[in-house]
Amino acid sequence: MNKTRIIKKIIGTVLAEKGFKYIRCERRLVWTFGRKVGDVEQEVYIQQHDYLEDDYKLMFFSSAEGNGMEEIGGVLPEYIRFSIKG
C-alpha cells in the first residue's frame, strides 16, 4: 500500500480546495501540506503513530499571532485518531 498516494488522494484533494499543496513526507511517518495567506503560513500534518500501527494524528499549524501547533483532538475531541486501511 502506498500511503503517500492514499493520503495525497484523500486528504490532499480536500485540502487543495482550500489552497493547500503537498509539501513533503518525512521518514514515511509525517505528511505535510501547506499554504500561505498574506503573511500567515498554515500547515496540516498527518502523522502515523508508528511504523507498525494504522493510527494517524491530524495536526494544524498557523504562524498567526497567538496560534501554533494544535492536534485535531484539541479542536474536535471525537477525532483524536483515525485509521487508513488499504
Image (cartoon, grey):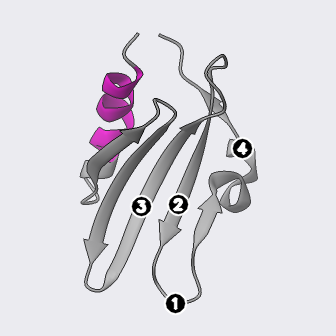
User: What secondary structure is found at the residue carrying circle 4?
Assistant: loop
x then y, percent, for residue 5: 31, 24
Q: Nearer the viewer, residue 9 or 50?
A: 50
User: What secondary structure is found at the residue carrying circle 1?
Assistant: loop
As displayed, is residue 10 above or below residue 45? above
Q: Is residue 74 left or right of residue 22?
A: right
* Residue, disc 3: 43
In this view, the mark in front (4 or 2):
2
x then y, percent, for residue 10: 36, 31
Quick one: label 4 or label 2, which is nearer the N terminus?
2
User: What secondary structure is found at the residue carrying circle 3?
Assistant: strand
Q: Residue 60 has which mark?
A: 2
Q: Quadrant of the N terminus?
A: top left
* Residue, disc 1: 65
Q: Which amino acid type is shown beneath numbered disc 1?
A: Glu
Residue at 52% of width from left, 33% of height from top? 29
Residue at 39% of width from left, 31% of height from top? 7
Distance from disc 4 to disc 2, alpha carbons, whole Å, reads 13 Å
Do the residues under discs 1 and 4 have CB atoms within 8 angstroms? no
Residue at 46% of width from left, 84% of height from top? 64
Mark 3: few, some, or many residues within 10 Å (few <14, many ≥20)?
some
Q: Which amino acid type is shown beneath numbered disc 4?
A: Ile
Quick one: label 3 or label 1, which is nearer the N terminus?
3
The range drawn in magenta is 3-14
Q: Which amino acid type is shown beneath numbered disc 2?
A: Phe
Quick one: label 1 or label 4, which is nearer the N terminus?
1
x then y, percent, for residue 80: 72, 44
Distance from disc 2 to disc 1, alpha carbons, whole Å, reads 14 Å
Quick one: label 2 or label 1, which is nearer the N terminus?
2
As displayed, is residue 15 above or below residue 74? above
